[in-house]
Structure formats: C-alpha cells, structure tokens
Image (tube, grey):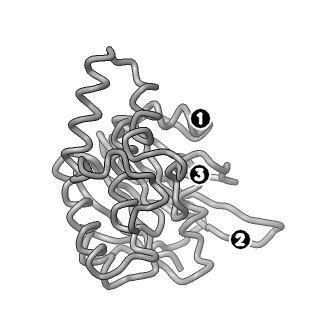
C-alpha cells in the first residue's frame, strides 16, 4: 500500500500506534526554503516501511529529524507513546531507535569482530553475556568466517551485514536505513532484502529510504511518498 503525504492548515495527530514510532506534522526549512512541510508517518514494530520521493524531497532530512541529528521547526516525534522530540540522538538510541546512514559507518581499521565489540562492550551486560552476544550476531548474520577480516576488505553486501549486526548489538526496537541499496550489486540487493525480512521477524520496525524505488517496494510492507 502506498500512502502520500498531504498538506493543510490544521490536522489531528496520527493515532499513536503503540508500540511504534510516529512523526506528527514535521516541518523543516533552510534559509526560508521549505524542505519538509507537514509530514506525518508511523512505523510499527515488525514491519518495513519505505519513505520515497524525488531528489530534494527531504527524505534524508526527515531521517535526521527522527533520529535527533537535527531539530525540526515544528511537529512531534513519539516513540512507543513517549514524546522524544526534544531528546538528543544518544537518548533516542537508548530508548531503542537505531540509525544506519548511507555512508559506511563501520570502523575501517578494525576487524569485523572488533567492530561488533565496540558496541557490545558498551552494553550493560556481563562479560559472559557480551561474548554470547558476539557469537550470536556473527552466526546470525553469516559473518563468522570474516570475524578477523579488516572491515576495509569487505564487499558492499558484507559491509551492510556487519553494520546491521552492529546496530542490533545496541538492542534497538526500530532501525532507520538511509539508502541501504546504494552502491550494491544485484546479488547484494537480494541479501539486503533477506536481512530486512530477518529484522521484521525479530520484531524490529524498519524505515527505509532509497532511490531504487522498484527494489525498495519489493522489500517493504507499505510506503510514504514525499512530494
């Protein structure tokens, strides 16, 4: 199902879907140039939703506002019924909101194993539980054989798997994926499709933006279009 954003002077808020993340009437301008106007969307746990639109429509800006990277000029963000509009990014992450940017976010000088450890060791877990989480994530994402491989040597698909595995080490309820299909080959697209399906099976809500509309729509349950 495709949903299109619209504009009006005043609208009621979207009904909060708990547990879920909801953006209510978000707006943003740069130097008086409107980038987002009255954008509302919602994502439930266990579903994948696309945010689509032409270049310059504000997709990445919307992502940045939802994660707390930049403030909005108006509107409200709720996570599981809680207003998180004024919270910084790290507080939102602690509440279960993960974000993977389009650019590579792994530490290129570290091995796959050490990239995962960088997040796992920040969690409030015993040393034994940290080790169990590491082994589980390596196995779950099929990168056990790459555990000591320098991240700079990974293919595009392998890199995305490691990035998503590392994001899951923070135990999020929702993940926002910015252009996950960019720069990957057709085989890797299928791999990413399977990864997103796996995230849904885990009960994680996924919001995706991508220029590859056809492949993106083949992955998600529904879509919003910015215009």
What residue sits 59% from the left and 53% below the top? Answer: 65
Direction from residue 62 to residue 142 in the image, left or right: left
Residue 227 in view here: yes
Task: Give the labeled residue for mark 2.
Answer: 34
Q: Secondary structure at mark 1?
A: loop
The mark nearer the N terminus, 2 or 1, is 2
Mark 2 Cα shell of 10 Å, populated few (<14), some (14-19), many (≥20):
few
Residue situated furthest right in the rendering: 31
Q: Nearer the viewer, residue 138 or 110?
A: 110
What residue sits 32% from the left and 85% below the top? Answer: 214
Q: Position of residue 28 (x, y in %)?
A: 68, 61
Direction from residue 97 to residue 61 in the image, left or right: right
Mark 3 Cα shell of 10 Å, populated few (<14), some (14-19), many (≥20):
some
Tag of residue 209 = none
Q: Secondary structure at mark 2?
A: strand
Q: Position of residue 126 (x, y in %)?
A: 32, 14
Residue situated furthest left in the rendering: 201
Mark 1 Cα shell of 10 Å, populated few (<14), some (14-19), many (≥20):
some
């Amino acid at each position: 199902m495709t949903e299109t954003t619209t504009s009006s002077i005043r609208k009621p808020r979207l009904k909060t879907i708990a547990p879920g993340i909801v953006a209510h009437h978000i707006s943003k301008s740069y130097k008086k140039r409107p980038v987002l106007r009255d954008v509302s969307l919602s994502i439930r746990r266990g579903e994948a939703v696309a945010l689509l639109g032409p270049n310059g429509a504000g997709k990445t800006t919307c992502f940045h506002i939802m994660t707390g990277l930049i403030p909005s000029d108006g509107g409200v963000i709720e996570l599981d019924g809680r207003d998180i509009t004024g919270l910084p990014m790290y507080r939102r992450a602690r509440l279960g909101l993960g974000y993977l940017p389009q650019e590579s976010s792994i530490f290129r000088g570290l091995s796959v194993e050490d990239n995962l450890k960088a997040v796992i060791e920040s969690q409030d877990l015993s040393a034994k539980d940290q080790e169990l989480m590491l082994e589980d994530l390596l196995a779950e994402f099929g990168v056990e054989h790459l555990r000591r491989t320098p991240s700079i040597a990974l293919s595009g698909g392998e890199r995305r798997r490691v990035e998503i595995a590392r994001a899951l080490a923070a135990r999020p309820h929702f993940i926002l994926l910015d252009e996950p299909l960019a720069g990957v080959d057709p085989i890797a697209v299928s791999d990413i499709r399977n990864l997103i399906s796996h995230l849904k099976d885990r009960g994680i809500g996924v919001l995706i933006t991508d220029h590859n509309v056809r492949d993106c729509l083949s992955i998600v349950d529904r879509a919003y279009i910015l215009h």
